[in-house]
Image (spheres, helix red, strand yellow):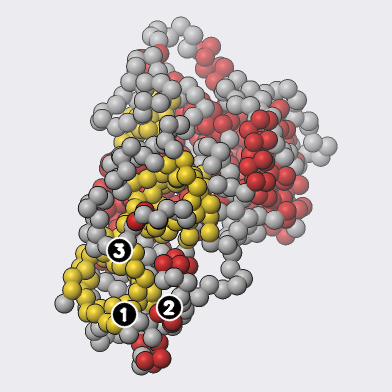
Amino acid sequence: MITLSDFQNYLSHKAPLKQPSHNYVNGQEQQLLKWAASLPTQTEAQQAMQLEQILTELAVADLDDKLRLKLLSIVSCASDRLITSLHKHYNYELGAFNNEQLAYIAQVESLYYLTILAYDNVIQRKSLALNDQQSTTSGHGWRRFLTLAKTSPLILAATIYQSLITYQKLLYEQNISYQQPRPYLWAAFNELYHLACEVNVAHTNLSTQVVTNHALSIHDLYVQICLHSLLNVRAMRRPNMLLTQRLLPLWSTHVHATIEPQTETRIFVDLQSDNPPEYLTANSAINPYEEHHRCLFIDLEPLTAYLHQRKQALLDSNNAAIEYQLVNKMLMAINHRYVERQMVMPTKYHSKQRATIIRSFNNIHYEVAGAHSLMNMIAAPELPTEQLPRYDTQPKKDIVNVILNVETFDHADTISQFRTLHLLPTEDLTQLQTAIDERVEKPSSHLNKTIVTDVNIHTTDKLNTAPPPLGLMSLLLLHHPNNSSKLKWSMGMVRWLNFENRYIEVEWQVFGHALTACALRLDIRDHRSQCFVPAFMIAGDKELQTEFTIIVPPYHFQSNDKVMLRIDDKQKTLCLQQCLINSDEFSQYKVIQI
């Protein structure tokens, strides 16, 4: 098994890969097919050991590259089967990974590293040979792409494609572990795509050369990788990450990405950097529209149009609730971050204040109700059995702490619905992240093979592999304990999480400050339950330009429902109007009194 440090040493040719003691292949395809068919009869550890030996052999063996790619395809299929089995040990973990799960991840990454090394040797040879062939080609910069008239180098194209897929899988492994994507990944993504553009194969249909279940061309695959980076995936729970990976090939077909900008999009990726796609701001390192920069411009508006249609289709079909909620979150996040961007970001001149956040619908309800449970605040003994709540909001003694310490900022625009806060991590995690930041050096290029000082995964990821305490569209209650004004309480929803800095930065939307805990039930007879559920009344706010609304748990109500609101023994009949927000944690409705 090799580590990231080993991988980068081999990739930079600082340390050559050693020929394995036992040869499995000897350049014989039939022998390798027979071996691959018998591999599942062995233990996972035995399979991994043999796969690593064969991948090493294919990386260093003196073979024709066309045959090498054919043999690598056989081994990659066997490797993917084993990796699918290893994924079952950790992909659906709800919390942080334990040592055993981290060991499985290290094994999976080792297989990917060796696969990349085998492809990289082919890329180096073919690209150097192509450079020699094209040394007399006229033209400079991006205009060269239009003047290359030679036949597309299909072996190089297929190798770049397979290498990109393997790097993409490494990116997925880092995401499932909630790790910040390491710079070497985006150095590789950008340089491989840049190389494909230079040799005029980025848009070549490779379906006759390789298995193209993911995308038909290098360009299509690279657009998938870019879109994945733009979707705030680390703000998701692991099941949603996996669903996003499955839907990404379809979603990316609705993304418009070109070298020459054809719209006024502000999303771009600098192909000469180790940076992922970004949104152009005054703080951007470059102006991508300047002639000497080599950038890809990405337009997400066609994707938002498709997601709107897909969301409505899923709603009309009344099924696929999991996909509906994911599409709903993605649509909200893309509009907030890229299409309708209006966030006021904090600066060093904003005053900072400490506050706390309470998360989880029932815990927020208990807090707003003055530490009274739902049963206690609705005079439950007076209610008929069919109207009694099926659950209470009294916190359980064994639940994980739901109170988070945060740092808020006083914006110049205090009436904005959109705010920013920082989650304050535990002390040990802060110290650990500082140590990591001091030890990691940024690489400059995949093909130039700059080395990165590795930090032992098994000593760092134990604290970092847990999902963030808040996710996209999470309901939150912000509490300023020392504030006696109406701003002591604020309820809202998470719209984006930034992980680039020391603290997780939360961009959120404020619903209101005047909150009342109550209970709500259907006041009509149909197949649905008549039980009371916890709810909130949020008063309209002129400064926020919001109207009176009600927040309820998801999947209980729908527009035009006649409902009964109850506090203590007092009741009032209302009618739910437009549903403003419908997430997997809560729904927000406009209401009118009947």
Q: Identify residue type, mark 2.
A: Leu
Q: Earlier in the sequence, mark 1 or mark 3?
A: 3
Q: Residues within 10 Å of mark 1 (few under 14, many from 20)?
A: many
Q: In this rendering, is residue 375 above or below 487?
A: below
* Label placed on residue 566: 1
Q: Position of residue 440 (x, y in %)?
A: 65, 30
Mark carried by residue 374: 2
Give the alpha-carbon distance from disc 1 to disc 3, as whole Å: 15 Å
Name the quarter where the C terminus is drawn: bottom left
- Residue beneath disc 3: 538
Label 3 crowd (10 A; few <14 / some 14-19 / many >=20): many
Q: What whole-number distance in Å separates the C-alpha atoms at marks 2 and 3? A: 18 Å
In the image, what residue occupies the spot 78% across and 30% down? 18
In this rendering, does residue 197 appear at all?
A: no
* Between 184 and 536, the one nearer to me in the picture: 536
The residue at 39%/14% (across/down) is 292
Q: Secondary structure at mark 1?
A: strand
What SS does tag 2 mark? helix
